[in-house]
Image: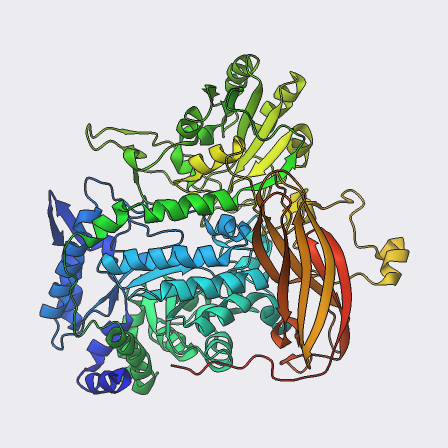
Amino acid sequence: MKNHELYARQLLKRLNLREKVAQLSQTVAGYRGFCRKGENFFFQPAFYSFLEEYGAMGAISNLLRADPFAVESFADGIEPRHRVKVANQLQKEVLDRSRVPIPVLIEVEANHGVMALGSEVFPTNLGLGCMFHDELYGRIMTSVGREISLSATQMGFTSMLDVARDPRWGRTEECFSEDPYLIGRYAQSGVKGFKVSNALLCCKHFCAAGDAFGGLNTAEVNVGRRELHDIHLSGARAAVRAGADVVMAAYNTVDGVPCHLNKYLLRDVLRDELGFGGILLSDGWGVTRAVEQMGMDAERGAAAVLRAGIDLSLADHGAFLHLIGACEKGLVEESLIDEAVLRILKKKYELGLFDQPYTEDDGSLVAYLQSGEQKKLAYEAACESVVLLKNNGVLPLSPQKRVALLGAHAANVYYMLGDYTSLQSEEEHNTLLEALEERFEELHYAAGWDFEGDDKSIEQALALARSCDVAVVTVGGSSARALAEATYDRHTGAASGSEMFLDCGEGCDVADLHLPGNQTELIRCLKAEGIPVVLLMIAGRPYAIAEENELADAVLTAWYPGLRGGEAIGDILIGRVNPSGKLSVSMPASAACLPVYYNRYEKTKENAKRKAYNRTYLDHLHPVLYPFGYGLSYATFSYADLQVERLGKNSFRISAIVKNESEIGGAEVVQLYISGSGNSVRRRAKELRGYERVYLMPGETKRVSFLLGKEELCVYSIHERYEVEAATVRVMIGSNPVLPLEAELTTEAEDAVYVRVDAE
């Protein structure tokens, strides 16, 4: 086995200061570093200027990015058949123009699939979390990692650490859940799945970005260390244990200190406490932002960011290049620069880049993308992510029904995809409209509402719906960026649908959670006409739909279901697929009730008795419309025979029997929660500590077992460490909020629950 660290140290000795800093600074973005002319690709002067001035290039980001931010299209972007050629060409230019030949890390965005022309678009994380199926997410990440590797690229950026604490935040769609346990399970499976490939996974964002003030992107986060450890570190802890290679810092401040300058978070917690030994990457322009926030000059700021723990900058406008001057002036030790460079070189050796910097352009990538494997995974995920919230007997629909399909989402695939999505070609997808046309004998479509509130569309929709048996109405929002070419026909070169509405995604936060435009008015009008309504929410966040929920006969939420979302929704509507998703976030009755996440602290008996202490709003007695863990099925399940078996000092096996009581097969997500009192700190009212997704045929029963150990039973104590305290703990099993089985167990005092992994 090769000693990668030894090789990296030997190579480091050959580099001068400028070459070292060039390994740490990403000034040239990949999508701005080339131009295309026909089938040929040429690199821009800025790319060559950087190599000429610094004699090296450590990494280059977003080579394949093809969205409005990158201003790319099929006409001038990198298509699948070009990826390997262009990446190899870039790699050769870097090696040939470096004094000491060191391969470059080529990075891509991969939030829910590789963000590139011709790539599959999976459901966004919010939908994936509602599957309660982290094993499937692991398989998705295996496929994403394989695509990245086959593309001759070496790193993918994926959101998996953020906690959805405020649905007003536009990046809620990038979060798996409001629950730290669920996030930890997904992070572990995602990292393990990805590591099957020969590429690096960058887990973002560290830390606590989802708890920003007012739900505003990049705003300050004010949490204590206990809240930090209980809620916001779970994903990072799980990712590090699974072998995460790269972690990206968040834009926000935590208790007044920018994450990029936060030594406590980056070194004391992530490296020393959790044992992370990989690369710490800044977010785009994160170094510049942090330095400006603290009013530092460029050289002192770059030195402070490096000292805090950041190894590699991202799109920094040259901010990290100031490390050269900082080092020459004695503002930062060269040994700290060496430490960061060493981590990067070591990863390059681990990838085998020095032995084989090029990827054979043998068509493997195109063959893989055309194999259908990713489409099957995306369809499976889309099916499992849909949550049935209400059903007054109207679903499933018979294919013989006359259906009115209403809503702007139905005819525009971009409204189904979410943020961090590339341009799509028409042959790569079906819209929801096209999918339902294939499943119903008689289907009629009208937009019915407008994001901007045009009432004329309502009259057209009502006229159409009056002749139908049922109206399926899409509602929600959009993360669709204004695309230069919304859909691109390869044969005619024509583009259509470039006008987009945007109220969600990065930088798109809202103060109000009511449905945009005149969506609610359409639902009111349909109800007044006596037309049965199936409400289908397509969104990147929970909206406050208390009125719409009351008016509708059935309600589903599909979040942003991806390219296969149309087929998945269609199959659920006709009963070909039984919905099985559970809410991974709580749905508020009103934005005025926020926050509504479920894992708050237990009310005391005294609080319950005294009206003045009841902690509810006089004008909103029921702040949660649908709770975390909730979701219906076309099947009915029952729970029985809860058993608790002590296996050791603080080790238990909890099991129960689940039965399908209906005449249709279906999947149930069995959920285990704990609650109880604590000695040094209060316990939360309810905390998820286990789940298992089981498929049961009609009448079938199965005993489902969970292991509860020290990690599930501990608290972050007043001693600022994880401890199991001597206490009585209540365990509950069911499907939240109905948890029919309860039992109590006792725990004994025990220290040192979380043991750090060995740093690489």
Left or right position of 224 against 493:
right
Find residue 547 and report its image quarter: top right
**Where's residue 732, x and y in %?**
72, 60
Q: Residue at x 62, y 19 (%)?
A: 531
Left or right position of 311 against 402:
left
- Judged from this view, the residue extending furthest toward the right is 609
Q: Considering only vertical position in the picture, is 404 above or below 45?
A: above
Q: What colour scheme has been applied to the protein in the rendered image? A: rainbow
- Count of number-bearing discs: 0
**Where's residue 614, x and y in %?**
83, 55
Q: Nearer the viewer, residue 118 or 520?
A: 118
**Where's residue 674, x and y in %?**
70, 65
Q: Considering only vertical position in the picture, is 567 above or below 586?
A: above
Find residue 654 and report its image quarter: bottom right
Q: Residue at x 64, y 16 (%)?
A: 529
**Where's residue 81, x and y in %?**
18, 48
Q: Nearer the viewer, residue 27 or 428?
A: 428
Q: Considering only vertical position in the picture, is 156 above or below 466?
A: below
From where the camera sits, is residue 117 visible?
Answer: no
Q: Quadrant of the C terminus?
A: bottom left
Q: Quadrant of the N terminus?
A: bottom left
Q: Considering only vertical position in the picture, is 690 above or below 355?
A: above
From where the camera sits, is residue 586 visible?
Answer: yes
